[in-house]
């Protein structure tokens, strides 16, 4: 089932290549629908969320012990669901791509295979292969279909991600040398039992730092974030949706699945440093977002701010904080995809993103205004929506941590600034007097059916996650509890 889910997009890619280009967009959408159905079937076939299930294991490169080992637990499943859902909405948003549609949709589907593979790979080498697979299509999707500075943005994205990947690879190889296995579950079990997973003389703290940086570049957190605003601003709207909605979560997933379980004592030892950069990311990202006049760049910096809660929750190390970090990844996945689509809708009509040049769009495009307001309030943490649950759970867990309670207080400034830049943008872009140019309905029509088909499902999931968060939290609750106990034991070990 999992192999079929991973490689179905490759079948769609081959169909895009073999059939006339006019069919590529339909193939992409249909393939994404099929992937979502398969992921839902995987969910339906799960017997609890505590153990790895749907396990597939076969020798791949036996000379060095590398296996095709894929499986899914609650943590993986939650991100598989997010990936399939956001990718489908992005595929629908891609319907209007006219420049070389065959090439675009082939790369889109290859990107989907890479993303799905990362979340189910249970062999370190296989994980790294899927991690790198997604790099190439994203580079071309930004570099060929992006904005005026697309080449600069795509090269910057590639170099930053590659630099992080090199550090990650070095760490993974050292772990393989020490543990004598590529199996992630086996290495976690060894680390949990106190066995060494590194060669003699290698400092676990340095390997953890290398892995942390490798994953933090993808999160991205301060100071490894500078590639993100450029990539978002130049990427086409559907690719910005995937970049913010899914790719950033690969970094958080890597920290939770690999870095923290492999090196819990090093993670506990570096917790204060990680909390510091998390607070900087939250507050700095919010202040920089407040200063932006480019609508899309504002949303990009808001992602830097919100993803700071992911590393903050891990730094706090309590079950509630880790739960909040994971929930932030899921909530931000749907909200950020919605926000970038909001920007894309108005850019298609106005052909610019200058916040100061808009005004009164609420009266010209009321349906669009309603969904834009919903996305803004979800992102700033309005009670009843998913962003509020994510932030509050992270704050509750961080306040429970005696060593990192200060970080919860310091992060409050980011919450205030988030409300400020969203409300100011809401006032400037949507409210006030409507300029004459927006009164021409032929140039500024309200949402099309395709645009509504992207935004409405994202809004409904965001609302459901805010009203009934247990749907998602029950998937990964066992994992977060286990990770908390691992970090607590490591903290006790450091104290003794």
Image (cartoon, grey):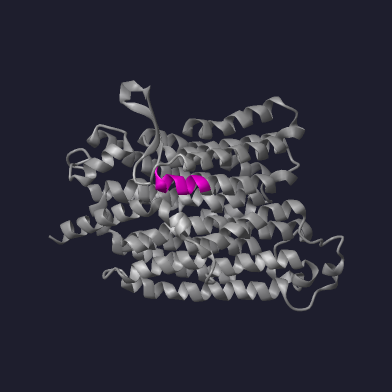
Q: Say whether residue 293 is visible.
A: no
Asked whether 79 falls inside the magenta stretch, the response is yes
Residue 54: x and y in percent read: 41, 35
- Given residues 471 and 141, the one toward you in this image is 471
Using residue 401 as the reference point, say whether residue 284 is left or right of it: right
Q: Residue at x 26, y 52 (%)?
A: 264
Using residue 120 as the reference point, say whether residue 439 is left or right of it: right
Asked whether 158 falls inside the magenta stretch, the response is no
Magenta residues, start to end: 73-81
- Given residues 479 and 487, the one toward you in this image is 479
User: Residue most toward the top?
Assistant: 63
Q: Residue at x 18, y 42 (%)?
A: 195
- Given residues 309 and 176, the one toward you in this image is 309
Check the image and report above or below for 277 versus 105: below
Residue 84: x and y in percent read: 56, 44
Q: Residue at x 42, y 72 (%)?
A: 411
Residue 456: x and y in percent read: 66, 57
């Amino acid at each position: 089932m999992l192999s079929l889910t991973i490689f179905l997009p490759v079948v769609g890619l081959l169909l895009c290549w073999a059939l006339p280009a006019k069919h590529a967009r339909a193939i992409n959408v249909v393939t994404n629908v099929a992937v979502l159905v398969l992921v839902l079937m995987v969910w339906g076939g799960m017997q609890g969320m505590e153990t790895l299930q749907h396990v597939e294991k076969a020798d791949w490169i036996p000379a060095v012990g590398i296996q095709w080992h894929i499986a899914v637990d609650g943590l993986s499943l939650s991100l598989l669901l997010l990936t399939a859902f956001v990718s489908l909405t992005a595929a629908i948003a891609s319907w209007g791509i006219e420049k070389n549609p065959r090439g675009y949709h082939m790369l889109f589907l290859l990107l989907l295979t890479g993303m799905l593979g990362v979340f189910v790979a249970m062999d370190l080498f296989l994980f790294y292969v899927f991690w790198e697979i997604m790099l190439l299509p994203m580079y071309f999707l930004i570099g060929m279909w992006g904005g005026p500075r697309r080449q600069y943005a795509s090269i910057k994205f590639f170099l930053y991600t590659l630099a992080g990947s090199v550090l990650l690879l070095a760490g993974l190889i050292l772990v393989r040398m020490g543990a004598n296995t590529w199996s992630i579950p086996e290495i976690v079990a060894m680390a949990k039992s106190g066995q060494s997973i590194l060669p003699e003389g290698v400092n676990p703290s340095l390997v953890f730092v290398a892995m942390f940086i490798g994953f933090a570049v993808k999160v991205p957190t301060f100071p490894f974030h500078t590639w993100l605003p450029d990539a978002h601003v130049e990427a086409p709207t559907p690719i910005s949706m995937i970049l913010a909605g899914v790719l950033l979560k690969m970094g958080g997933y890597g920290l939770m699945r690999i870095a923290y379980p492999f090196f819990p004592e090093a993670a506990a030892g570096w917790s204060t440093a990680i909390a510091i950069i998390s607070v900087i990311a939250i507050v700095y990202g919010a202040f920089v977002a407040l200063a932006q006049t480019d609508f899309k760049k504002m949303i990009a910096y808001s992602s830097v701010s919100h993803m700071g809660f992911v590393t903050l929750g891990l730094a706090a190390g309590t079950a509630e904080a880790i739960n909040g970090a994971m929930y932030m990844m899921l909530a931000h996945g749907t909200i950020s995809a919605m926000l970038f689509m909001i920007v894309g809708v108005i850019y298609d009509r106005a052909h610019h993103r200058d916040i100061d040049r808009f005004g009164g769009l609420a009266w010209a495009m009321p349906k669009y205004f309603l969904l834009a307001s919903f996305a803004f309030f979800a992102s700033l943490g309005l009670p009843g929506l998913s962003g509020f649950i994510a932030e509050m759970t992270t704050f509750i867990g961080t306040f429970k941590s005696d060593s990192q309670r200060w970080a919860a207080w310091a992060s409050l400034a980011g919450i205030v600034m988030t409300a400020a830049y969203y409300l100011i943008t809401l006032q400037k872009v949507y409210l006030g007097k409507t300029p004459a140019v927006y009164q021409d309905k032929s140039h500024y029509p309200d949402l099309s059916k395709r645009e509504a088909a992207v935004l409405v499902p994202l809004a409904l999931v965001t609302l459901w996650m805010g009203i009934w968060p247990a749907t998602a939290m029950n998937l990964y609750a066992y994992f977060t509890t286990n990770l908390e106990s691992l970090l607590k034991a490591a903290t006790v070990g450091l104290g003794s």
